[in-house]
Image (tube, helix red, strand yellow):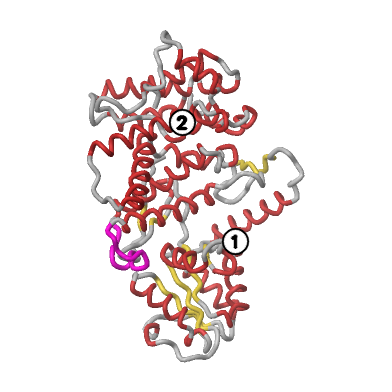
C-alpha cells in the first residue's frame, strides 16, 4: 500500500484529503454546516438525515468534543471541510457568524451550497449560485442534496450496514471478546469484519491525524512570527508542507503510543499502516524540532547552530532508548495477542515483500540496488522473525536478535534508518526491559545501548 497525500483543489490553503491510494479514508468530502442557532431544529434534522444517507457532515452541536475550545474547533472544521452548506432564513442572513463563515469559505475557494429553509433575501454573494429549496418538498430536496454531496447508492448501503453493525455491537458490550460478523454489501460479499466496540477505527485515527496535521501546520507558519489568527489566509501551504504536517502528526501519535496514551491493541489493524509509513529517524528529528521550539519560546533565540541541532537529535535518540528499558511503558504480554496476527502476516508472503520493498527504496539512494535489497531483507527477517517469540515467550535469544536488527536498521554513517515507527512502538511497548538491559550489558552480545535505534 502506498502512502502519501491527496490534496483538495478547492482552495489556496486546502487541507489534505484522505484517499484510497494512500490509505487515508475520505472518499466523500466533509460538508460544514453554517447556520443560525434559531434554525437549529432544521439544521440538526438535516445533518442526521444526511449522515443516515452516507454523507460526511460536520455540525457544531454534534461534533465539537467536550472540553474543546468552541471557536478553535469551529475554525478548524471550517478550514478542513471541502464544502459548506449555508442554511438560509431571515435569521441566518442577519447573523454575523454565518456571514463570516460564508466569507471565509468563498475566499478559500470552497464549494458553497445554499440551502433555502425559509423565505428571505438571499445574500448578494450567493445570488449566482444554484440553491436547493427545502421550503415545500423536504424529501425531494434532500435527495438532490445527497446527490450533490457525491453519495452513491453503494455509500447508502455501506452506511446502513455500518449502522447495523454498530447496533449489533451495542448489544455485545458485556462480551469480553470480539466476534466475527459477516459484512455483506455488494462490494464486500466475501469480506469478514471484526466487530468490537473496543477497537478504534481507521477512520477515527485518520481524523485525529488530520486535526493534528492542521495544528502542526499552524505552528510551522507561526515560525514566521505572524499572528496565528491570520496564518491560514496570509500564508498558503504548499503540497509538500501539508504532507510534512501530516507526517509530523503521525509522529506525534507515535509518541502518544510510546507514552501509552494511545495503545496499539486499542486500534483496528487497518490503523497500523499509518505508523509503518513514517520512520523512527523522523521521530528523533521531530523530537529535536519540538525541543528547539520549546527553547525558542523560553529564550527568544531564533537561530540555532548545527551543533545545537545535533545535540538535540542525540538526546532524542537517548530518550527513545530510555523508553526501551522503562518498565512503566510496557504493555502486558496478553495484549500482544490482538496484534500478533498482523505482525505474523509480515513474516512472509506479500506482507514481507511490501516491507522489504519500502525499506529498499529508502536505502537505494545511498547504496547499489543489490546491497539495498540485502540490507532490507536481513533487517525485516530479523525483526519480524523474532519479535513474536521475544514477546510471547520472553525468549532471550529472540530479544537479542530483535535488538541486533534495530541496531542494523538504525541511521548512521550516511545511511538512512529503515526502522518504522510501528516497529519502534512494538519494541518500546512489548520487549522485556530486563532482557534488553542484559543484552546491552553483555559485551559479547554485539549490541549496546548506544547502537540501538
- The numbered disc on residue 134 is none
**Residue 434 percent across, percent down from the top left:** 55, 19
**Quadrant of the drawing holding the C terminus:** top left
182 with respect to 409 (left or right): right
Q: What residue is disc 1 on?
A: 66
Q: Residue at x 50, y 26 (%)?
A: 325
- The numbered disc on residue 423 is 2
Q: Say which element carries label 2.
A: helix
Is residue 234 shown in magenta?
A: yes
Does residue 354 appear in this view?
Answer: no
Q: Say which element carries label 1.
A: loop
Q: Residue at x 50, y 30 (%)?
A: 428
Q: Residue at x 38, y 87 (%)?
A: 124
Of residue 377 and residue 261, the one placed in the foreground of this image is 261
Q: Residue at x 59, y 32 (%)?
A: 331
Disc 2 crowd, CA 10 A, few/some/many (<14, 14-19, 20+): many
Instruction: Please give the range of residues in magenta.
Output: 224-237
Amino acid at each position: 500500500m502506498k502512502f502519501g497525500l491527496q490534496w483538495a483543489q478547492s482552495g489556496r490553503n486546502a487541507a489534505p484529503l484522505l484517499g484510497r491510494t494512500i490509505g487515508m479514508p475520505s472518499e466523500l468530502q466533509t460538508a460544514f454546516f453554517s447556520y443560525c442557532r434559531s434554525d437549529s431544529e432544521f439544521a440538526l434534522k438535516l445533518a442526521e438525515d444526511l449522515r443516515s444517507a452516507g454523507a460526511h457532515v460536520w455540525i457544531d452541536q454534534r461534533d465539537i468534543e467536550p472540553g474543546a475550545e468552541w471557536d478553535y474547533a469551529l475554525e478548524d472544521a471550517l478550514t478542513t471541510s471541502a464544502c459548506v452548506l449555508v442554511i438560509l432564513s431571515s435569521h441566518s442572513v442577519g447573523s454575523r457568524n454565518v456571514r463570516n463563515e460564508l466569507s471565509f469559505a468563498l475566499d478559500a475557494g470552497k464549494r458553497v451550497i445554499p440551502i433555502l429553509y425559509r423565505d428571505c433575501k438571499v445574500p448578494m454573494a450567493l445570488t449566482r449560485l444554484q440553491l436547493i429549496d427545502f421550503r415545500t418538498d423536504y424529501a425531494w430536496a434532500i435527495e438532490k442534496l445527497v446527490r450533490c454531496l457525491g453519495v452513491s447508492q453503494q455509500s447508502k448501503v455501506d452506511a446502513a450496514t455500518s449502522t447495523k453493525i454498530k447496533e449489533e455491537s451495542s448489544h455485545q458490550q458485556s462480551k469480553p471478546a470480539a466476534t466475527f460478523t459477516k459484512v455483506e454489501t455488494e462490494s464486500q460479499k466475501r469480506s469478514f469484519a471484526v466487530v468490537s466496540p473496543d477497537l478504534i477505527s481507521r477512520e477515527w485515527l485518520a481524523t485525529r491525524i488530520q486535526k493534528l496535521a492542521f495544528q502542526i501546520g499552524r505552528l510551522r507558519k507561526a515560525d514566521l512570527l505572524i499572528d496565528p489568527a491570520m496564518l491560514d489566509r496570509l500564508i498558503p501551504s504548499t503540497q509538500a508542507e501539508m504532507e510534512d504536517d501530516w507526517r509530523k502528526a503521525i509522529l506525534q501519535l507515535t509518541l502518544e503510543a510510546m507514552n501509552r496514551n494511545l495503545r496499539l491493541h486499542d486500534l483496528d489493524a487497518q490503523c497500523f499502516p499509518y505508523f509503518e509509513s513514517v520512520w523512527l529517524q523522523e521521530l528523533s528529528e521531530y523530537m529535536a524540532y519540538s525541543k528547539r521550539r520549546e527553547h525558542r519560546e523560553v529564550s527568544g533565540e531564533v537561530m540555532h547552530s548545527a551543533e545545537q541541532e545535533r545535540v538535540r537529535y542525540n538526546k532524542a535518540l537517548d530518550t527513545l532508548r530510555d523508553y526501551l528499558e522503562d518498565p512503566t511503558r510496557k504493555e502486558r504480554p496478553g495484549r500482544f495477542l490482538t496484534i500478533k496476527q498482523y505482525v505474523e502476516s509480515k513474516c512472509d508472503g506479500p506482507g514481507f515483500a511490501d516491507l522489504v520493498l519500502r525499506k529498499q527504496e529508502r536505502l537505494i539512494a545511498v547504496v547499489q540496488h543489490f546491497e539495498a535489497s540485502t540490507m532490507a531483507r536481513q533487517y525485516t527477517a530479523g525483526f519480524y522473525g523474532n519479535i513474536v517469540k521475544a514477546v510471547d515467550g520472553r525468549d532471550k535469544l529472540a530479544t537479542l536478535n530483535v535488538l541486533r536488527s534495530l541496531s542494523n536498521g538504525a541511521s548512521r554513517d550516511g545511511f538512512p534508518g529503515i526502522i518504522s515507527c510501528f516497529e519502534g512502538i512494538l519494541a518500546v511497548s512489548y520487549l522485556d526491559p530486563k532482557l534488553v538491559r542484559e543484552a546491552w550489558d553483555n559485551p559479547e552480545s554485539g549490541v549496546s545501548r548506544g547502537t540501538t535505534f
